[in-house]
Image: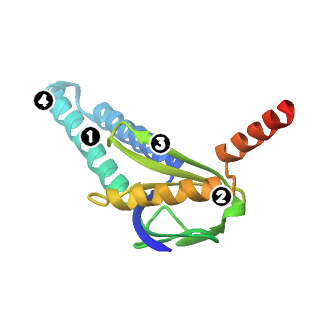
Amino acid sequence: MKNLILNYHKNILLLCFIIAITLLGTLLLLITLLSLPKESFGILTVSSIVTSIFLMAIVLYWAINKEINIPCKVDVNENGIGYRFLKRSLFYQRKDFYSGWENVIGISEIFCNATGKYFYRLKFKNPNITVNLSPIREKDAEADYLFSELEYYQNTYLIGEAKKNYHKRSAQNLAQA
């Protein structure tokens, strides 16, 4: 058993927040532009647009790096997997979670084009949640260790793809017999 420090996030929250901030920023920009006098439409318009884009970028950066991607302590062992947040977040209610391997229905490794790194997605039955775990800067070794452990437990407890491959091999063996 090894405790790992990784980042936790949910893709749906990230997507919803990006859409909400973009829509809200655009709405505020339109309200500002429509309230400007028609005579001062030149430099004031350009400065309003630039300020709006700059503020949206700052809010998105803050939310993604401080509130959506949360550092957590991950515990992986023969009984299951769990995590505990190392700081509070405005968006996540649950501070910790633990599940036995029988409750895990999917484990996948996904490459992120934006960061050039892999993250790991775990799907659970009850509660029906999907968790993404990614390396914290300069902690790639911990993410590699997590993946090797997840791969081991996935094959040991026949989770997700390992279960499908097992059943496929079993059916082929029966057909050959």
Q: Secondary structure at mark 1?
A: helix
Give the Cα separation between the discs numbered 3 and 2: 21 Å
Mark 1 sits on what residue? 52
Mark in the foreground, 1 or 4: 1
Q: Which percent across, then down, holds residue 20?
A: 45, 43
Mark 2 sits on what residue? 156
Mark 4, Cα crowd under 10 Å, few <14 / some 14-19 / many 20+, is few
Pointers 1 and 4 in contact (CB under 8 A)? no
Give the Cα separation between the discs numbered 2 and 1: 52 Å
Mark 1, Cα crowd under 10 Å, few <14 / some 14-19 / many 20+, is some
Give the Cα separation between the discs numbered 2 and 4: 65 Å
Pointers 2 and 1 in contact (CB under 8 A)? no
Q: Which percent across, then down, holds residue 59?
A: 31, 51
Residue 99: quarter of image: bottom right
Q: Earlier in the sequence, mark 3 or mark 1?
A: 1
Give the Cα separation between the discs numbered 1 and 4: 14 Å
Q: Quadrant of the C terminus?
A: top right
Q: Is residue 42 visible?
A: yes
Mark 3, Cα crowd under 10 Å, few <14 / some 14-19 / many 20+, is few
Give, as a three-letter code, the residue at label 3.
Answer: Ile
Residue 18: quarter of image: top left
Give the Cα separation between the discs numbered 3 and 1: 33 Å
Mark in the foreground, 2 or 1: 2
- Pick whichever, 31 or 61, lies toward us: 61
Mark 3 sits on what residue? 110
Q: Secondary structure at mark 4?
A: helix
Mark 4 sits on what residue? 43
